[in-house]
Amino acid sequence: MRAAVALADRVGIEALSMRKLADELGVVPMALYKHVANREELLDGMVEAIVGEIDPPTAGADWKSAVRGRVLSARRALQRHPWARQAMETRTTKTPAVLDYMDSFIGMFRAGGFSIDLTHHVMHAIGGRMWGFTQELFDDAPRPGTAPRAPMPPEAQAAMMQQMAARYPNILAVAMASAHEDSAVGQGCDDQFEFEFALDTLLDGFERLHQQGWTSARARGQATGS
């Protein structure tokens, strides 16, 4: 699995094959099938190896610091292996290491006194951030493992901006905000800044709900006016 991870780091997930891995290990391809049934099972094992790089919860830390540290450790692991996000998103089987991580992640909120009810909704809200990634709304950069897009000619870009301004002024205003000189994130979207901003906003909200003794039954009752 370590050899497969190192190979994917070099060639990308799409180019990874059983034959290339066998060549890397100096064995015939059939030798690999003694360990994994197919490429999908190989990818499951590689994801397990990446999950194993995520730091355990910090002993003695409060729940918010523990969760934040764990999430940012997961993010660093994915940044070391740019193909890992794509592999995680395509896995249909939750392996023991993945389940262990999820159970431990839930346990950090439970250790902080969160009810099962609130923790359930917290896990829905935090979503993929628990693995260190989010779906970016305004980032046009290519996904890891994909070829970069050809640059758009200046005149075509100007025409597109005019159309966007006329039809989707609000989207354009938010998407272009980070290009302004006085932007807090500088030129273009700062992915790390945006990730931590969203993570901290969520954690602050979770803390407030926890302190208020929030329950889903009460929230649903307020929503329906009952």
Image (cartoon, helix red, strand yellow):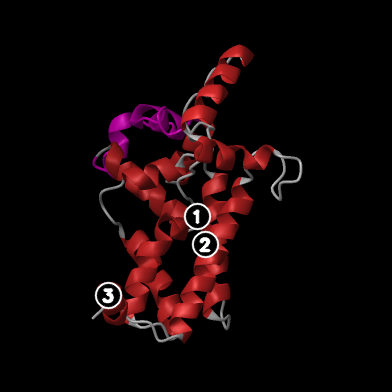
Q: Position of residue 84 (x, y in %)?
A: 45, 44
Q: Give yes or no for residue 31 being in the magenta stretch.
A: yes
Judged from this view, the residue extending furthest toward the right is: 181
Looking at the picture, which amino acid does disc 2 mark?
Val
Where 39 sits versus 156, above or below?
below
* Residue at (28, 32) in percent of width and height: 30
Reading the image, the residue beneath label 3 is: 220
Tag of residue 192: none
Image quarter in which the C terminus is found: bottom left
* Residue at (53, 62) in percent of width and height: 199
Tag of residue 71: 2
Q: Mark 3 packing: few (<14 Cα in 10 Å), some, or many (20+)? A: few
* Lower sequence index among marks 1 and 2: 2
Tag of residue 132: 1
Where 201 sits versus 176, above or below?
below
Q: CA distance from mark 1 to mark 2?
A: 6 Å
Which region is colored magenta? 11-37
Where 67 sits versus 170, above or below?
below
Q: In the visual, does 215 lie left or right of 37?
A: right
Looking at the picture, which amino acid does disc 1 mark?
Gly
Q: CA distance from mark 3 to mark 1?
A: 30 Å
Q: Give yes or no for residue 220 being in the magenta stretch.
A: no
The answer to whether marks 1 and 2 mark residues whose Cβ atoms lie closer than 8 Å is yes
Q: Nearer the viewer, mark 3 or mark 1?
A: 3
* Residue at (32, 77) in percent of width and height: 219
